[in-house]
């Protein structure tokens, strides 16, 4: 499909279709769902103009984020440990939920979210991280 991009991310494959003409986006969904119906070993996670295709292993971004935080917290000095998770896609909502009370969760954008905080864009995330790092260094 012209405009579609398949991105290999190791165990996950992302099908980006934001550059597909709007009139053809429903066809992308139909084709993807047809292919996925023949692959019960895979899970389809819909995001904003992207489909993530991952193995059905009982893990998702939330499970992985919680696992990483539990390992990180053991190795960092407790008084200086700040875990931040920022994301802008539907699949990040799983991590926001899993990290509630364990991390600072930030949604990037204007969509509804369960993240604790929200910023407008990537530059705001960068500015926030810079301010946090400066505060921790002092």
Image (cartoon, rainbow, N blue to C red):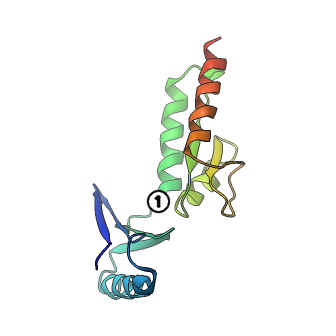
- Answer left or right for 108 relative to 20: right
Within-10-Å neighbours for mark 1: few <14, some 14–19, many 20+:
some
Give residue 91's position: percent from left, percent from top. Answer: 52, 62
Q: How many marks?
A: 1
Could you tell me which quadrant the N terminus lies in?
bottom left
Above or below, 23 against 12 in this view is: below
Residue at 53 percent across and 39 percent down: it is 69
Estimate the x, y position of residue 132 in percent, counting from the top left: 64, 26
Q: Position of residue 79 (x, y in %)?
A: 66, 20
Which residue is at the front of the view, 120 or 6?
A: 120
Q: Does 30 sit above or below residue 56?
A: below
* Residue in the foreground of this view, choosing between 129 and 69: 129
Camera-side residue of 100 and 47: 47
Q: Is residue 40 left or right of residue 109?
A: left
The spot of residue 32 in percent (x, y) is 35, 81
Under circle 1, the secondary element is loop
Q: Is residue 125 above or below residue 32?
A: above
From the viewer's perspective, tell me whether residue 40 is left or right of residue 25.
left
Which residue is pictured at 64% across the width and 47% down the height? 106
Which residue, given by chain and number where applicable, does mark 1 sit on? 60
Task: Please give the name of the residue rendered at 29% of the width and 86% of the height, measured from the top-left corner.
Answer: 38
Residue beneath the point at 64% across and 25% down: 131
Which image quarter: residue 51? bottom left
Q: Closer to the camera, 53 or 124?
A: 124
Looking at the rendered image, the quarter that the C terminus falls into is top right
* Residue 110 placement: quadrant: bottom right
């Amino acid at each position: 499909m012209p405009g579609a991009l398949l991105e290999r991310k190791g165990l996950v494959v992302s099908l980006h279709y934001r550059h597909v003409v709007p009139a053809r986006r429903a066809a992308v969904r139909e084709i993807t769902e047809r292919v996925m119906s023949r692959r019960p070993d895979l899970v389809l996670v819909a995001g904003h103009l992207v489909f993530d295709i991952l193995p059905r292993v009982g893990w998702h971004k939330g499970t992985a984020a919680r696992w990483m935080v539990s390992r990180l917290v053991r190795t960092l000095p407790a008084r200086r440990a700040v875990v931040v998770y920022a994301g802008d896609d539907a699949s990040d909502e799983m991590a926001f939920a899993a990290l509630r009370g364990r991390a600072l969760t930030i949604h990037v954008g204007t969509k509804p979210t369960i993240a604790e905080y929200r910023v407008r864009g990537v530059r705001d995330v960068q500015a926030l991280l810079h301010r946090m790092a400066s505060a921790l260094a002092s």
